[in-house]
Amino acid sequence: MSTPSSRVAAEALDAADELASLRDRFVLDDDGPIYVDGNSLGRAPRSTAARLQRVVEEEWGRGLIGSWPDWIERAGLVGDRLAEHVLGARPGEVIVGDSTSVNFYKLVIAALDARPDRRVIVTDAANFPSDRYIVEGIAAQRGLTIRHVPDDPEAEDIVKALTKSDVALVTLSHVSYRTGAMLDLRGMTAAAHEGGALMLWDLSHSAGAVPVGLEEHGVDLAVGCTYKYLNAGPGAPAFLYVRSALQSELRQPIWGWFGTSEQFAMGPTYEPAFGIDRFQVGTPPILGLAAVDEGVALFAEAGIDRLRRKSLELTDLVLARHAEWLVGHGVEVVTPRSPSRRGSHVSFRHPDAWRICRALVEDAVIPDFREPDVVRFGLAPLYTRFADVWDAMDRLRTVLVEQRYESFPQERSRVT
Amino acid sequence: MSTPSSRVAAEALDAADELASLRDRFVLDDDGPIYVDGNSLGRAPRSTAARLQRVVEEEWGRGLIGSWPDWIERAGLVGDRLAEHVLGARPGEVIVGDSTSVNFYKLVIAALDARPDRRVIVTDAANFPSDRYIVEGIAAQRGLTIRHVPDDPEAEDIVKALTKSDVALVTLSHVSYRTGAMLDLRGMTAAAHEGGALMLWDLSHSAGAVPVGLEEHGVDLAVGCTYKYLNAGPGAPAFLYVRSALQSELRQPIWGWFGTSEQFAMGPTYEPAFGIDRFQVGTPPILGLAAVDEGVALFAEAGIDRLRRKSLELTDLVLARHAEWLVGHGVEVVTPRSPSRRGSHVSFRHPDAWRICRALVEDAVIPDFREPDVVRFGLAPLYTRFADVWDAMDRLRTVLVEQRYESFPQERSRVT
């Protein structure tokens, strides 16, 4: 498929798009702004409010504690659906609950405790802040060393970082929140294993955007967010994956009652459940799980491979319009151009990135900004149209050519 | 007010009850079962589904990332409401998010790190399992000692346990999930302080049932659940309280990005926020917080003191009917009789407790069972009527007198 070179051609692609009808499944107004920030917060499925109403009024309101036999299975059930339709994992390998950060904490400690003689954690300084801070905190508390590989590393960087056999854990984001670079998940996992380390992936910017193939690539551990491409709502419960072969040897540090095999037996001592349930902590967030389930259901319909094909076509269009319109306007594409090395967002660098974002919002395009100088266009193939991308790039061109951003203040708001 | 001695008198109390109209604010059917398990899972407020719909369709669906300036304050805002209307704490002392168990973990470690030379944690063996397990896990990981005080202890038990100046933390449940006993929050907090320890209360079974007066009683640390008396839904986000004077000296172990002062600045190192925000971890659960807010709103209307008065009248009625009807039928009340020593549920012990619960459910009364031999009647003054209590006790009498429970199997289901 060739990248459209006119708005009419972009519209024609939308007309032929077999995924196009899924856009109608989201809450949106056709005269609303162009939303290219689905990588920060995905749109709301239309079905979610009705599902929540059923959960509140029927399951909770009338079912009351009689709903527990269903609820008790739900974190695993939603996890299994996510495993099947999004993550390429097996049943019983994924659980949904807690925040991405709490899940990340649990798995970092589980991994470190499984390699007690090794005192080094490998990551990159460009990793998502919450992951970096949590690693920093655990390293400080345990007196461990953090070894940084270059930002957006290659597999050979991992090999080099592991030569001394002192690394317990390698942890990286599959797709960089800032640059949009997608790392070599298979190669780096293999490199970590070669060096005797466990590998923990943060899939927040790839789950729902690219096939991650956790089983196929022999991934040990992963966490990720469901409120980005998975459209489960702000602060929705996150997921946690542990390869089944590792589950019985790993222990997580927060010994909550839902991590036991029989939480309602309330026995005298903590006995971790046999499978993935041991990575749960407290009572599962039933309303949040319902919203995750609605988000995941759309992936079951769309298919992650078809979504990835469209996503690449969308990011191709961004790159093509950049080459055609924006060269010479001080906007650098920082996202790798190779299809195998990019996720579903494209990041631009410009010294006035903050003001450019403000000017775009004024022009009814919603991108986002990342410190210090990055504009991100996140393209969610479930609802982003080719014509949207065309128009967003066109408006970016206008903002730059006419230097419209110069009328906006430099001061950042707290929330960016 | 005297305890009603007939069903007609109970109905008269309902007719005169100034809180009675609040019952209409909950999802329920007048011909539905009598629900005496609000201490396990509170009923659904009628307003919750509509509020969630607004959050999903307006704030999230149409507001998209433009809602973040509101959302970023929400965990603290809902916490402030809970502080004011339920907990007797000051603004900026309560935050809502994560599960009770995760919050408990954070505060246990924060307290231990603030008393690094002390190697003992004091608790009771009857504490809620998740709290016991988490303490067990942390003690195992750090090589600490757990010292048990007697179940449902008195303040003098705390004094005795602290004589060696080796205790970093005392942690207890304010109201026992099993016996319904309410501990001497003020006296035990003072005893812990006298012994140089910090005190962490689990308020899961008291928040929303009794005034806890955290500021008045000088409480250091507290956590609690919002899905029991606070009616926020199964697995709703929990709360966490830290006395303002302690906030700057305490650090929690999970260094997530929402614990920093400027999470969207995404700086190179973790800098904990100044106030209660440092006890947050990941992105706040916006849907769950909306449900908590709806639950708390009813307390702002009802007033916790009025609710407590009605709660004591309801539990008085249980005790009076037990004395009148059940003595000699092998059912022992394990909840203390003194009003100052009971919460809002009454626990009965009987060797056939499991089967009695099954027989009650068949007779349209929903209590709950706790291993090995406890039947609990939880009375939620927002929606439990005096006539409900009368009828529930009357049906319990029938089940016992006619030994109806004998036709039910002994085998427990997994979820009780």
Image (cartoon, coloured by chain):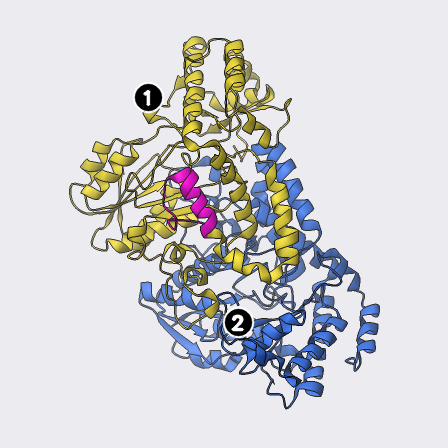
Chain colours: A blue, B yellow
Chain for numbered disc 2: A
Magenta segment boundaries in residue numbering: B76-96
Asked if the magenta segment contains residue B27, the reply would be no
Could you say which is closer to the camera, residue A34 or residue A60? A34
- Total number of numbered labels? 2
The relative height of residue A12 versus residue B87 in the rendered view (above or below) is below
Place of residue B262 in the rendered image (x, y in percent of width and height, measured from the top left): 43, 65
- Location of the N terminus of chain A (image quadrant): bottom right
What amino acid is found at the position of numbered circle 1 in the picture? Ser
Residue drawn at the location 43% of the way across and 39% of the way down:
B85
Mark 2 nearby-residue class (10 Å; few <14, some 14–19, many ≥20): many
Question: Percent x, y for residue B71?
Answer: 53, 56
Q: Is residue B282 left or right of residue A24?
A: left
Please report the residue visible at 61 percent of the width from the left and 34 percent of the height from the top.
A61
Labels 1, 2: one chain: no
Dot 1 falls on a residue whose secondary structure is loop
**Amino acid at dot 2:** Thr
